[in-house]
Amino acid sequence: MRAETIGDATLYLGDCLEILPTLGKVDAVVTDPPYAIPTIVATGRETTRSVGDLSIPEAAFRVAFDQWDTHLSDQGRAFVFCDGTSYPVIFRASFGRFLQALLVWNKMQIGMGREFRKSHELILHAWKKGTPIFSDGVGRADILSFAPVDDKVRVHPAEKPISLIIELLRVCGETILDPFMGSGTTGVACANLGRKFTGIEIEPKYFDIACRRIEDAYKQPRLFEDDPPKYKEVDMFGGNE
């Protein structure tokens, strides 16, 4: 294990399941875990899937949520990125431990491939019973529209835009954990908002990138003010109130 301290960020290179038991309480987990669902290759060229495949990642996520439940404060919450296939698995793994809601990241552009192409990702919002629903008195839309990171500057294949993470952090407390840190976007967002950050990454290449990005973020003036956006509330069944 290797550890680096940069400003209010503590970064660990290693396996999160080994490092998490050594950590204290945090106010929020904001993370984008690996969530690919395995397939079974049958005879010839056929590739089949069965419901049983889902038990493999579900078991892993149950372990993860057990750890997060232990480390989250009494008013803690988690934001976990996923997709349409992995969402049922992550939902089941967290069910009973947390209250849950589904958020949608609208990327405002379509991807490649299918007839109906993906233009979004999903985010499981899980919170403890003591977590205030309106932590800062603001009601927010559950569809978050932010352009993805441009391919020309992307340093991680699953990199999220800093502005999107900033929006999630606005309702979180002061201490943030990302056990699947990747290239450190959550840490950069924390630096911009003045939050304390703990990040864990198992891949040395991305750990080094995260250290550099977070160090650079601390050298820059804060790019975002911690003022929540304003939303106009409407009656979804009968027009404006």
Image (spheres, rainbow, N blue to C red):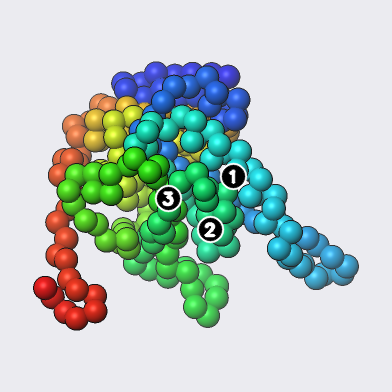
Q: Secondary structure at mark 2?
A: helix
* Mark pair 3, 2: CA separation: 15 Å
Upstream in sequence: badge 2 or badge 1: 1
- Which residue position holds label 2? 87
Is 92 on the left-hand or right-hand side of 217?
right
Dot 3, how many residues are within 10 Å of its Cα: few (below 14), some (14-19), or many (20+)? some
Discs 1/3, front: 3
Q: Residues within 10 Å of mark 2 (few under 14, many from 20)?
A: some
Q: Quadrant of the N terminus?
A: top right
Give left or right: position of 147 versus 68.
left
The residue where tag 3 is placed is: 99
Answer with mark 1 or mark 3, whichever residue precedes in sequence: 1
Q: Is residue 28 above or below residue 51?
A: above
Of labels 3 and 2, earlier in sequence is 2
Disc 3 and disc 2 in contact, CB within 8 angstroms = no
Which amino acid is tagged 2?
Tyr
* Residue nearer the viewer, 239 or 96: 96
Q: Is residue 205 visible?
A: no
Mark whose residue sits in front, 3 or 2? 3
CA gap between label 2 and label 1 equals 11 Å
